[in-house]
Amino acid sequence: MVPSGSAQIVDLRSDTVTKPTPEMRRAMAEAEVGDDVFAEDPTVARLEALAAERLGKEAGLFVTSGTQGNQVSLMAHTQRGDEIILDENSHIFNYEVAGLAILSAVQARTLRSRHGILDPAEVRDAIRQPNIHYPKDTLICVENTHNRGGGTVYPLATLKEIRRIATEHGLAVHLDGARLWNACVATGIPAKEVAAQADSVTFCLSKGLGAPVGSVVTGSRDFIGRARRARKMLGGGMRQAGIIAAAGIVALESMVDRLREDHENARTLAEGLAKLPGITIDLGLVQTNIVIFEVQVGAPAFLAAIEEKGVLALPVGPDRVRMITHHDVSRSDVERGLDVIRNVLQHSNGEQAAG
Ligand SMILES: Cc1ncc(COP(=O)(O)O)c(C=O)c1O
């Protein structure tokens, strides 16, 4: 349990821990609301239109979470018994409680990726020809930035090639853009250009953008109509949801450009870690706000030692640790975190030398 509001804690577990800004809280208090299941909430409608406009899509749908956004997208794109092609390290395959199998009743064809980036030639080879024995491939899922890949950004040319292959074979593309805005800020490529490479795009308001709740799914009007029915089935039809959508509007309008600071902080953190003994890190993979590295002492011992000194992070393997920078972590927090890690490692190296 993390003591809330403690100035001592440097919380690098995830960008989901960000608290709403004062501007968000004001917007929430003043939000105009209605019953959104009756399509009467003007603030939700405004957020959905804004998201669709920013991504160059016809329509948007406010959903409770990134997971719900991905799952309603899968439900809207596929039929029972279809096959979907996705990376074996994707969030949809690993962290959504087998929702693809349960909710959409589809089969997952997982491919190896390079730090989350699929090889278009392997995607093409994985698409099955029509045959009575085979499931029908209907969807390719990509993730940008890639969480388990370490916040890596999809090269636009790769996305374009995957899109071209999908179109040639009659498949749709879904982009899990939980951290899409990080990718756009890191590359300077407009969100519309990235989103144009997919039929549907989800992004999270509640991660680096700092809103308390919610994600948005975008796509064609038809697709969003089907996703809306799927959302209702999952119990995601919310009533006066304008209260939370209001914070989402502030997030989208005022929190995108500042992601640059999180990326700079991640870089400072990564470069500091690279200098420490007992840590192995590939600086080339630190492209946005995620920093993944290996610790010689093992993740559990390392995490317990830094937690004792008020620095929090998460394990992503027996020796692998993930840290994420965000709005509620300042440059001086990063420096404090590095000091703590330096001390902890010096201590553990000293013990190893002595023992
Ligand atoms: C790439 C990716 N997709 C989807 C999600 C799911 O978002 P949520 O936690 O809002 O369900 C996450 C969350 O970390 C994520 O990293």
Image: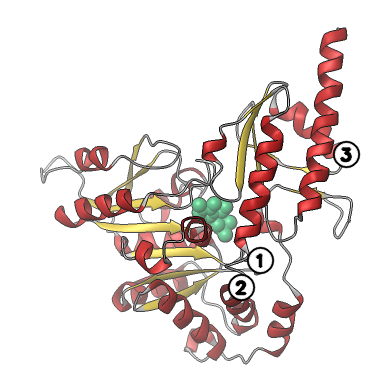
| Amino acid at the residue labelled 2 | Ala
| Amino acid at the residue labelled 1 | Gly
The residue pinned by badge 1 equals 210
Image coords of residue 6 (percent x, y): 88, 56
Image coords of residue 20 (percent x, y): 72, 70
Residue 159 appears in view: yes
| Mark 1 crowd level (few <14, some 14–19, many ≥20, 10 Å Cα) | many
Mark closest to the chain's N terminus, 3 or 1:
1
Q: Is residue 248 above or below residue 305?
A: below
| Mark 2 crowd level (few <14, some 14–19, many ≥20, 10 Å Cα) | many
The Cα atoms of the two marked residues, 3 and 1, are separated by: 25 Å
**How many numbered circles are shown?**
3
Q: Residue at x 60, y 84 (%)?
A: 242
Q: Is residue 33 above or below residue 96?
A: below
Image coords of residue 4 (percent x, y): 85, 58
Q: Which mark is residue 309?
A: 3
Circles 1 and 2: CB distance less than 8 Å?
A: yes
Q: Residue 251 carries which label?
A: 2
Pick the quarter of the image with the C terminus. Answer: top right
Q: Which mark is residue 23?
A: none
The Cα atoms of the two marked residues, 3 and 2, are separated by: 32 Å
